[in-house]
């Protein structure tokens, strides 16, 4: 089976969003159905990658060692459900640092494209915020909005602007749609 790439945002898509930032493994709480979604994607031939802004590092709310512990917990939870997260890339910078990796800029997606040796054209990128969708569009990827996390607010803002995007209730619904498409492919 040919592996296909799918890129997920973390906070608000895989785990609960926190306005105070997720600063420890104990604060990392998966959204209902998200581990099942990652398992479904894995079972259907997708390579799952995560691309996430993590300015909590730049804000000195957590260090890289703690972030890696959070990601180990996330990977273990996905594995226990039968899924796999192959790669995690993140931006540790503050919004005003001027980096090229903080979404809405596409630097994290460029890094994943280089790692996998693929074009991002048409690659599903699942997020809950306008910046996730903008990063996807910048590279011709397939932006998908989920209504968990900040998704409802994002959808409402996009509706006010007359913008439309593929939208699902949560990551599990998006994964089911992607899996269904995958089954129809030759």
Image (cartoon, rainbow, N blue to C red):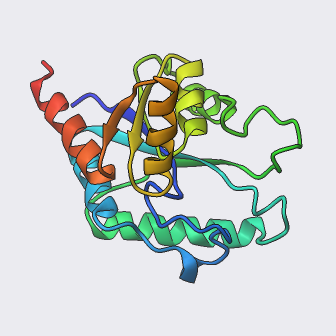
- Residue 65: name its quadrant: bottom right
Residue 112 lies, in percent from the top left, at: 57, 33
Say which quadrant the C terminus sits in.
top left
Residue at 52% over, 54% down: 10
Residue 160 in view: yes
**Can see residue 86?**
no
Task: From the top left corner, tell me how far across and down residue 164 is, in percent.
Answer: 40, 25
Residue at coordinates 81% horizontally, 49% vertically from top-left? 93
Q: Which residue lies furthest to the right in this view?
A: 97
Residue 50 lies, in percent from the top left, at: 51, 47
Q: Position of residue 101 (x, y in %)?
A: 73, 36
> Is 142 positioned to the left or the right of 111 in the image?
left
For the residue pair 115 and 123, the one nearer the viewer reads as: 123
Quarter of the image with the N terminus is top left
Residue 177's place in the image compared with 12, above or below, is: above
- With 101 as the anchor, is 48 left or right in this view? left
Give the left or right position of residue 110, taking residue 36 as reference: right
Point 79% across, 62% down: residue: 57
Q: How many marks?
A: 0
Extreme residue in the front direction: 160
Q: Which residue is drawn at 20% across and 38% down?
A: 177
């Amino acid at each position: 089976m040919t592996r296909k790439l799918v890129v997920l945002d973390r906070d608000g898509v895989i785990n609960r969003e926190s306005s105070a930032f997720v600063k420890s493994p104990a604060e990392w709480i998966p959204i209902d159905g998200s581990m099942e979604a990652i398992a479904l994607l894995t079972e259907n031939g997708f390579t799952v990658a995560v691309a996430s802004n993590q300015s909590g590092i730049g804000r000195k709310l957590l260090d890289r060692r703690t972030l890696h512990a959070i990601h180990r917990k996330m990977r273990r939870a996905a594995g226990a459900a039968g899924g796999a997260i192959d790669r995690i890339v993140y931006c540790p910078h503050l919004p005003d640092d001027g980096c090229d990796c903080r979404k809405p800029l596409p630097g994290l997606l460029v890094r994943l494209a280089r790692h996998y040796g693929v074009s991002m054209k048409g690659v599903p990128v699942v997020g809950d915020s306008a910046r996730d969708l903008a990063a996807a569009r910048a590279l011709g990827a397939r932006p998908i909005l989920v209504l968990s996390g900040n998704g409802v607010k994002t959808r409402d803002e996009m509706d006010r602007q007359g913008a439309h995007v593929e939208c699902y209730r949560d990551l599990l619904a998006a994964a089911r749609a992607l899996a269904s498409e995958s089954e129809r492919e030759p």
